[in-house]
Amino acid sequence: MTQESKINLAANEIDQSMFEPLAQEDKNAEYIAVEVKTFAKDSWDRFRKNKLALAGFIFIATLVALVVLVPILSPYTYDGMEMENRNALPSLKHIFGTDRFGRDIFVRIMYGGRISLAIGFASAGINLIIGVVYGSIAGYYGGTLDAVMMRAVDIIYSVPSMLYVILILMVFGNNVWSMLLAISLTSWVSMARQVRAQVMSLKEQEFALAAMVIGASKSRIMFKHLVINAIGPIIVCLTSMVPGAIFTESFLSFVGIGLSAPSSSWGTLANETRQIYSTYPIQVIWPVCAICLTILSLNFIGDGVGEAFQPKRKDN
Amino acid sequence: MVKYTAKRILQGLFAMFILTTITFFMMKIIPGNPFNKDNKVIPAKQMAALVEKYGLDKTIMEQYTDYMKNLLKGDMGISYNKVDMTISSIIKRTAPVTAKLGMVAFGVSLVAGVTLGIVSALSKKRWVNNIITVIVTIGVSVPSFLIGIGMMILFGVKLKLFPLIGLTSPRHFVLPTIALSLSPISYITRLTRSSLRDVMNQDYITLARSKGTKNIKVIVMHGLKNALLPVITYCGPLISGLVTGSFVTESLFSIPGIGAQFVNSVNNRDYTLIMGLTIFLGLLVIVFNMLADFVSAAVDPRIKLKG
């Protein structure tokens, strides 16, 4: 084949259609990228992949719904007694059975859940506020202020927080509010440490400098720029606090130095069954299961949240 | 090392001072004093004598300086409820019981935790890891007191395998020890597993292997030696956890130790005893935290350079 015929052949293959503009949707055909997701969507997708975490989430969501709706759903009240029906085994009428006064155990567990869960979530919320403010101030200002603030944290940390909680309970009485106060005052230190570490490394980055250069105030830089960027570790720390608070409360109530009736949390309910564990072991099981399953679920959620918000974190 | 040690001791002393001060003033701001609760029983004259005996007629600051002075001498005063019993004598009676159980639980936690951690880090078999993960998850999530009561029902009441009350024979130790040490075991397993996995990927492990060192020697001498540092640091919090755990374990199993005594004193509102035991237990934990820090600083030179 001669040189000339080769050119002719090539010329024949080029026709007008090749010069038409591409359709709009084909323009990025070779552009390689994953679907653009928001931070929340991205984290949720990763969270969903962890089946245990998802199961824990469903359990807690169901529990919260039951606990909130129990007065509407159940015909029994929290303290309604059926004297002819005491220490009954689980049946269709009373799905968890009844206690020594003929009170429906399921309803009592649900009301106890109100207190236990409320203490867990509320104290985590208070911890979040104290810990974030304290940690970001220490981390941002640094120097002597940081040293003094962190020594204070070390001192609080070096004594078992249970001792402080018991002291605070003794001063303010055995009610839900002082329990909340006691747990909140003693367990924010890990959050403060976490936030401080994050803020210290973030404040060295360019965006913090840029914010400073355009004249943003210190509190704006701290909370709008630094703390927001540390949101992953903060949420991870937050999810680990809820089971911790529920544990502390139920521990103290179980020993008999926490909440006492009429505000019966799961710990109090478990404590009430201590005398009858050999005669009616089935009654011990309900509060115990409630506490265990809740803490287990919350821990699973914590693991899932950890993977979702800190994908780089090593699995241990 | 000297500078690090001095700094750490100073910090510990300061923590002790803060703890005693806070405890003292918290006890003093509790409304009312224990003798006017049912003072119909106590005649006015005797009441005055009691108030004087406990120094309640002095100002708070005087009481505070007196208490701190006596504390330095090791004198914590006398119990409100059991008159004529000094706090120190109560501690002397109950602490050894707790210490015995605590040391057993401490040893079991370390040995079992480290062993499980090694097995799970090195085992290539999936089912081994799965079993250990299940144990660890339960141990972390199920509070010790629930494990305690669960075992009481299962082994004590249903199977009648172990005695439930007291701490008189080795068989009595089994259930309380498990209740106390299951959650530390889980933490130590996690710690050992993750740090050993990290260490085994380091270059010096590959080097040791390539020199033909025996596998067991690589694991123990090169791997474990470096992987155990976080475990040593954890010993401080471990003691703290055992102290808190003793409150409930001893009450559950009726063990006459310091934890059960503390819970009783809170129930009886025996303020001087609460104060004494809080300070004693707090000091204990502070000292053990300090010791754990010293050991890890001695083992790992990097720590004292940082601190």
Image (cartoon, rainbow, N blue to C red):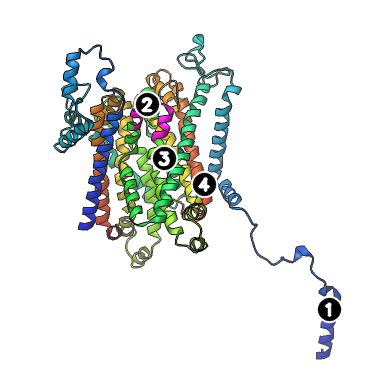
Kindly identify which chain the residue marked by label 1 belongs to. Answer: A
Q: Residue furthest top?
A: A84
Label 4 environment density (alpha carbons within 10 Å; few <14, some 14–19, many ≥20): many
Q: CA distance from mark 4 to mark 2?
A: 36 Å
- The residues tagged by marks 4 and 3 sit, at their Cα atoms, a distance apart of 17 Å
Looking at the rendered structure, which numbered label has been put on residue A173? 2
* Residue drawn at 39 percent across, 52 percent down: A138
Q: Amino acid at mark 2?
A: Gly
Q: Callout 1 environment at 10 Å: few (<14), some (14 to 19), or many (20+)?
A: few
Q: Which mark is residue A305?
A: 4
Q: What is the x, y in percent for residue A29?
A: 72, 65
**Badge count:** 4
Picture disc at residue B140: 3
Residue drawn at point x = 44 percent, y = 41 percent: A127
Between the C-alphas of marks 1 and 4, the distance is 58 Å
Vertical side of B83 occupied by B280: above or below: below
Three-letter code, disc 3 = Val
Could you confirm whether marks 1 and 2 are on the same chain? yes
Residue beneath label 1, please?
Answer: A13
SS class, disc 2: loop
